[in-house]
Amino acid sequence: MKTWNLGVVGSGLIADFHARAIGDLDNAKLVGCCDKIPERAAALAEKYDAKAFDTYQDMMASDDIDVVTIATPSGFHLEPAVAAAEAGKHVICEKPVEITLDRIDAMIAAHEKAGTRLGGIFPYRFNDSQKVLRDAINSGRFGTISYAGIYVPWWRTDEYYKDSWHGTWKLDGGGAMMNQSIHMVDMLCDIMPPIESLQAYTGAIGHDIETEDTAVAALKYANGALGVIYGTTASWPGQFRRFEIMGTKGTVIQVEDSFTVWQFADEKPQDEEIRAKFGGITGGGGVSDPAAIDYENHTRNFQAFLKALETGEDFWIDGAEARKAVEVILAIYKSAKEQRKVKLT
């Protein structure tokens, strides 16, 4: 079995998630890291017995690295991703894959030209409960879906926004939507038809930041269903994220990785098993502390990407798929700024 050697660009909090996830894989090894702050790269390298590179360009020049993971501030994903493609290295990139569609498209084009692979990181897609929900939707158990909405009532302190990039347009690309709520927006992109149009409002209500800490949007999906997106980092002390989906034959309410409601008109024997297995609320990391998020699904995300490299199969969250959530969020920002409905399809 091939061992994939990985290098991580960026050595902050998310890079540590990547390093731990890589360490749990039998066919992967973290061999290098870099950061604009050399001391931070050195500390991560020492912790995981890897090599600290002075720059990401030096990392790309190393023949020891097969795959690059990107864990820099969001608005600095393009440059190392393109450099990796030009060096013949695959890339798996933390969310959002970038902060504008043009920059995402440039990343995709670079890897298509090089014949390398670009993948995104959306760990929620790998929750066990998510597969159960996806199967229920795909098998038509909801009948005609009438509503699907997401809620991310999280909390971040003022201190969180005092670094050099959180809550800035240049490097965060937005606020509560682009950084925190994007996971749940991606959930809609994964399991629902495309969003046809939306109308949104945003505001910096609880924090003195240039982007938003609260946003809400009313949605219309391509199949006619309606929905809501709500995300904030100004909801002390932070509450569990929630997804609701309702149709003419069923209703499910998912709180974190669990189901508080799982009801269908055509009750099946496995429904009681699902309620028993996923009935107790689990998860909750991230509602007020980004360091509290579990990295297990990062491991599954990396594992799936490496499997796609080995088999040559398409990766579930390629660059085009990872782009979808950013497109929705940018439409929210556009609608809020222009105070009008925005069409996406």
Image (cartoon, rainbow, N blue to C red):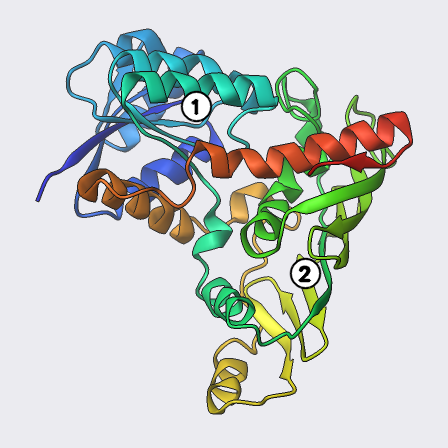
* Left or right of 62 on screen, residue 318: right
At which x and y percent is residue 291?
Answer: 53, 42
Helix or strand or loop: what does disc 2 sit on? strand
Sequence-first disc among 1 and 2:
1
Is residue 131 among what the camera can see?
A: yes
In this view, the residue in front, 2 or 140, is: 140
In this view, the residue in front, 36 or 260, is: 260
At which x and y percent is residue 271?
Answer: 52, 85
Residue at 18% of width from left, 34% of height from top? 4
At which x and y percent is residue 153?
Answer: 74, 51
Is residue 236 among what the camera can see?
A: no
Label 1, label 2: how far apart the Cα atoms are: 31 Å
> What's the residue type where badge 2 is placed?
Arg
**Quarter of the figure with the N terminus:** top left
> What's the residue type where badge 1 is placed?
Ile
- Where residue 336 sits, quadrant-wise, is top right
Disc assigned to residue 108:
1
Question: For the residues carrying marks 1 and 2, which lies nearer the camera in this image?
Answer: 1
Residue at 68% of width from left, 60% of height from top? 242
Residue at 39% of width from left, 14% of height from top? 82
Q: Is residue 279 above or below residue 258?
A: below
Residue at 62% of width from left, 41% of height from top? 182
Label 2 near label 1: C-beta < 8 Å?
no
At which x and y percent is residue 66?
Answer: 21, 26
* Left or right of 253 on screen, residue 9: left
In this view, the residue in front, 46 or 190, is: 190
- Where residue 329 sits, quadrant-wise, is top right
Q: Neighbour class for label 1 at 10 Å: few (<14), some, many (≥20)?
A: many
- The residue that label 2 is drawn on is 242
